[in-house]
Image: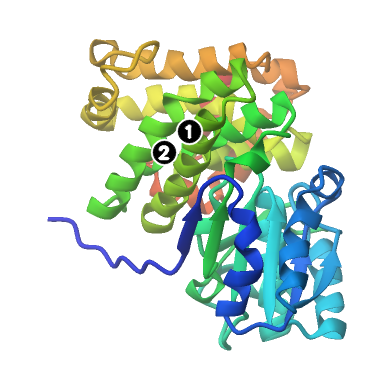
Amino acid sequence: MMSFDFQPRTRIVFGPDKIDLLGELASELGARRALVVSDAGVIAAGHTQRGIDPLEQAGIETCLFDGAQENPSTDDVEAGAKLAARHEPELLVGIGGGSAIDCAKGINFIYSNGGAMRDYWGVGKALKPMLPMIAVPTTAGTGSETQSFALVSDAETKKKMACGDKKAACRIAVLDPKLTLTQPPSVTALTGIDALAHALETFVTKPRNPVSIAFSREAWRLLAGNLEKVLQDPQDLAARGAMQLGASFAGLAIENSMLGAAHALANPLTADFGVVHGQAIGIMLPHVIRFNAKQVASLYQELLDTTADVAGLPQPSDGAGGLSAFVTELVAKAELPTRLSECGVELAALRKLAVDAGQQWTGTFNPRAVGESELFDIYQQAF
């Protein structure tokens, strides 16, 4: 019997053009002033203004913070919090990928509770209520819209800090698949691979439970069956919708079972060598699957059973090896590197990377125990 504490906090509004409901949804939360957090690329694509328009039409005064960066840093969050202090919002709206949404969450921590982002590294460290927040993801990747965690990099040390608090969970997630149509192919691939990893990792972590398993399984079915479709036909709206919903379900799985060694291994690659997160995940995940198979082969088998009738996916008889090869093939089909040596990572740095990976929180939830030695071996295999 697996114990769990399921606390659904995020309303999910899904479908084409649902961003047009943003003003109505914000009004339901009683807000009259909103701080919109977005980034330059999403602003240039017109999605940010598409969200601001219904807010203003509903009589909600808006202020835009356009300083969200990829892998948001403590500097980004502090700049946004200063703008929030001048504007005094009653609502935060994050429009963009996981970075913009995480940046908005970080702003919420500091604006609502004071101090610095480092004060909230960990779980449940915000003592005061936080502002309601609406997330409008324009990618299908992190699932941040359905999690209570913000990933923010320390501007000085470059370490990623996972800052979690149930009060930081978004009140509403608006999933409009049309917003993902403008993604460059590389972003579609990188975010999709990250989401797929979330489904695979959460399905086998130590804290997995009936709730997380249900979300992981459905996320895997949606993501694995549609990622190649959107790579081949970026305008396939049905596949885009399946990817966005799958990413959000994977986020709900993370909220209830956490992640594993693939993310522990990926974060130092981003911090030390600037390897984009999705790329780092795509390289490390196949090796982690093979490593974990000694402990959870039956769970990987169960996951494959759920997609046995989907053409092109690994069949149950392929086992964990087929699952691992499937991920590698997806990365290759996206025309992305499949080895660390192709990403500028230095062989001599693997030992230090293993030390840093061993300090990552997510590794503690991996189904098979990982320490510096095991992580070093996995890095070597991926090199």
Q: Given the current orientation, which residue lies at the most extreme bottom position?
A: 128
| Image point (43%, 69%), residue name | 9
Say if mark 1 contacts mark 2, CB within 8 Å: yes
At label 2, which amino acid type do we have?
Answer: Ala
On the image, the x and y values in percent for residue 2 come to 18, 56
| Image point (70%, 24%), residue name | 185
Location of mark 2 (residue): 199
* 311 shown above or below 240: above
At label 1, which amino acid type do we have?
Answer: Leu
Which part of the image, by quadrant, shows the N terminus?
bottom left
| Image point (35%, 30%), residue name | 292
On the image, the x and y values in percent for residue 276 come to 71, 34
Location of mark 1 (residue): 196
| Image point (55%, 30%), residue name | 193
Which part of the image, by quadrant, shows the C terminus?
top right
Colouring scheme applied when the structure was drawn: rainbow
Could you tell me which secondary element the residue under label 2 belongs to?
helix
Could you tell me which secondary element the residue under label 1 belongs to?
helix
Residue 147 seen from this side = yes
Q: Nearer the viewer, residue 223 or 153?
A: 223
Q: Nearer the viewer, residue 159 or 226?
A: 226
Dot 1 alpha-carbon crowd within 10 angstroms: few under 14, some 14 to 19, many 20 or more? many
Residue 378 is left or right of residue 249, and the answer is right
* 115 shown above or below 6: below
Instruction: Give how far apart the Cα atoms at labels 1 and 2 are.
Output: 5 Å
Q: Given the current orientation, which residue lies at the most extreme front position?
A: 57
User: Which quadrant would residue 271 be assigned to in this image?
Assistant: top right
